[in-house]
Every structure is written in C-alpha cells, then in structure tokens.
Image (cartoon, rainbow, N blue to C red):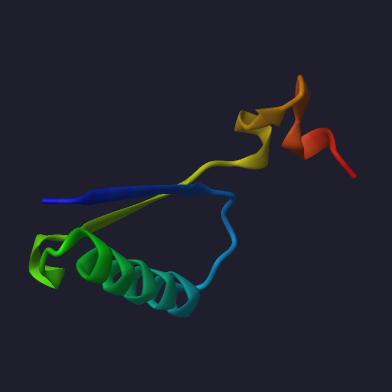
Amino acid sequence: MPVVRIEMYPGRTQAQKAELARAITEAVVTIAHTTPEATQIIFYEVPREHWATAGVLASERK
C-alpha cells in the first residue's frame, strides 16, 4: 500500500487538493503497478511560522 505524504503551506482549495490527489494517484498506479484503492494520499498543512528554510522562518520571508 503506497502512502504519499504531502507537506505544504495552508491555502489550497479543496478542488486543488482533489486534483493533486487524482494526479498523484494516477502516477503511483502507473509507475508502482498498484491500484487506486491501495494508494493513500495524506495532506499536511504546515503553517508558515512552523516551517524554516536556511534558518529563516517562512513567515518572516518576504
């Protein structure tokens, strides 16, 4: 059972997440030779103040 975890900033619509889930599921099914029913997609929405790159919080970037 493939599990795909996606971490991103909040703000995407339900429609965007649904489209992303469909596209990723299709790719996993094609490449990993599995089924859509066995493919799990989990979205984690991480606030910008909890995410840092190069020592700088995303919430502090311009």
* Residue 3 screen position, x and y as percent: 23, 49
41 left or right of 23?
Answer: left
Quadrant of the rendered image containing residue 22: bottom left
Q: How many marks?
A: 0
Seen at 32% across and 69% down, the residue is: 27
Residue in view at x 45 percent, y 80 percent: 15
**For the view shown, which residue lies furthest in the right direction?**
62
| Residue toward you, 33 or 60 | 33
| Quadrant showing the C terminus | top right
Of all residues, the one furthest to the top in this rendering is: 55
Where does the image place residue 36, in percent across and percent down from the top left? 15, 71
Residue drawn at the location 49% of the way across and 75% of the way down: 16
Indicate whether 60 appears above or below 45: above
Q: Is residue 29 left or right of residue 37?
A: right
> Measuring 9% from the left and 61% from the top, which residue is drawn there?
38
Image x and y of residue 5, in percent? 35, 47
Q: Is residue 41 left or right of residue 2?
A: right
Q: Quadrant of residue 39?
A: bottom left
The answer to which of 12 and 35 lies nearer the viewer is 35
* Residue 41, x across and y down, in percent: 28, 57
